[in-house]
Amino acid sequence: MGDSPPTAPQDISIDWVHVRALMRERIGAQLGTCDPGVLDDLTQEGVIQFLRLTRRETPRNLGGVVTVVAKTVAIDEIRRRQRQRLRFADWEQSQAEIDHASSPLTDAADTETLWFLMMEYFRGRKAPCAELARCYAEHGNWRSVADAVGRGYEAVRQQWARCTKAFRDDLRRHPGPFQDWTDGDG
Amino acid sequence: MADRRSRDVHAWFRARLAAHDAELLDDEDARRFEAHAQECAECGSAMSTFAEPRAADAHTGEHIPARLLARWPETRRTLRGLPRRLVREHLRQCAECRADLVAIGHDAVLEADPALEEATGHPRVVRGGDIGGTLKPWIAGGAVGAVLATAATLIVVTVWAPRSVDMVSVPPSGTAATMARPSPFVADVLPPVIALREPLRGTAVSETTLRIQPGTRYVHVLLPELFVSDTATVSIHIVGPLGDEQAAVLRRYEELSRRRTLLLGSPDRPLEAGHYRIAIATPFSTELPAMEMGLTLAR
């Protein structure tokens, strides 16, 4: 994140109409039958991911990058559907859930949304927590984080527990789409 | 009763899948979650849906997830509570996320809305659409920045309904259009709509003449039906009497097509008489051949 405009190599010439068409085709091929509106949304998602990648690195094989991004988006969607099916497997429950359903895009089943919100919360309010979260994202487990920051495992875990409690407490007051799990036994 | 209790455990577990994956559960919940994953194969398999490969932004948190940006009209309309406030804070500071939104044809603004931000609980599902409708995003291209980065002195207001007006103001040397609600006064005194003459079949240019009084600040014109898909991004460029580009607007056709009217002018000064050119195109698709409508404002 930063307030400077995106840097090169965004100046490379990319045929965005072609990228979009290719992305749509590849995601569609991965998913099989798909509602055209959903496919539009997923294509858009893929294109944003592609845009972010090209901002970091000039793609040498445009078709290859599109294929990789499309596959990731499609797999992510398939898994999201699996989770949704499980959550709404019980009709009685689904009636209640659907009645006050949050928008699918802000569904609590997305780690990336939750992780982003938590990071944004820490960035603006608790910088050491943001640093710890970044370290976890890099290392993937708390033992490695403890080694990396030169502190004990328990100390790191306790700090993380305090960080996440602050976020959970604030989120509980204004949970938006995350009421399901901030509600205690909800 | 046992069945009900068991169902509640599964529901409890499945509502916390992402929170667990994001290391956000407290110790007690985390223990309960992991114990249930061990004993319930179905819930355990739900947990495995978080295995690799992951979305590229699953654990970075550096930018607004592509999933939210890709459905931006819906995000703007429905995101609530602390999450809305956090997304807005991020957008204000992050040039890349703003650029992403502009690149796909959206205004990079998430309005502060106390009603949404203070809200607790779930939004009701709105069926049948509201004034904003559900927009299906369309990829715009790298040219978007160029489209928006124009000198402009004219304010263009796209009008959806008599009392619901969005104002698009292109700053003189800015790089992005900004949106603002005009004063209720503007919405209340909309001048009558004048239909712009459509280009005849086989031509791409038309001319309309409109008499204005001295001191007239706005003209209200109706665009022709473009017959493009709702998701198409439509660009409108307005060139003034001196050949200077006065405004550039990028909209999804669905946003324009509700009434297809533009309110041209500025609250700060009267409109200049002369010949204006309104160029309309779908820059990122070939759905619409570029067309140009001349509008002569005569005293």
Image (tube, rainbow, N blue to C red):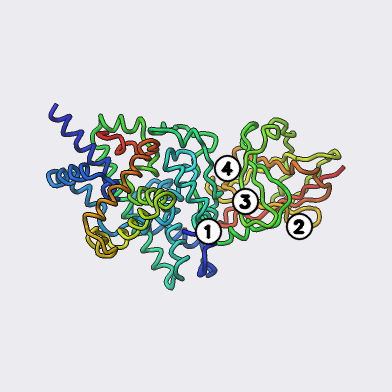
Tell if the residue under mark 3 belongs to the same chain as the one under mark 4: yes
Of badges 2 and 4, nearer the viewer stands: 2
Of badges 1 and 2, nearer the viewer stands: 1
Position of A166 compared to B93: left or right?
left
Quadrant of the image occupied by residue B191:
top right
Q: CA distance from mark 3 to mark 4?
A: 16 Å
Q: Amino acid at mark 4?
A: Glu
Whether residue B202 appears in this view of the structure is no
Label 3 close to label 4 by CB (< 8 Å)? no
Per the image, the residue denoted by label 1 is A3
Question: A151 or A30, which is in the foreground?
Answer: A151
Quadrant where the C terminus of chain B is found in the figure: top right
Going from the N terminus, do you reach mark 2 or mark 3 first? 3
Q: Chain of mark 3?
A: B
Per the image, the residue denoted by label 2 is B244
Specify few, some or many for label 1: CA neighbours under 10 Å numbering under 14, 14-19, or 20 or more. Answer: few
Per the image, the residue denoted by label 3 is B177
Q: Secondary structure at mark 3?
A: loop
Q: Amino acid at mark 1?
A: Asp
Label 1 close to label 2 by CB (< 8 Å)? no
Q: CA distance from mark 2 to mark 4?
A: 26 Å
Tell if the residue under mark 2 belongs to the same chain as the one under mark 3: yes
Going from the N terminus, do you reach mark 3 or mark 4 first? 3
Question: A10 or A173, which is in the foreground?
Answer: A173
Per the image, the residue denoted by label 4 is B255
Question: B262 or B157, which is in the foreground?
Answer: B157
Q: Is residue B155 above or below residue B117?
A: below
Q: Amino acid at mark 3?
A: Ala
Specify few, some or many for label 4: CA neighbours under 10 Å numbering under 14, 14-19, or 20 or more. Answer: many
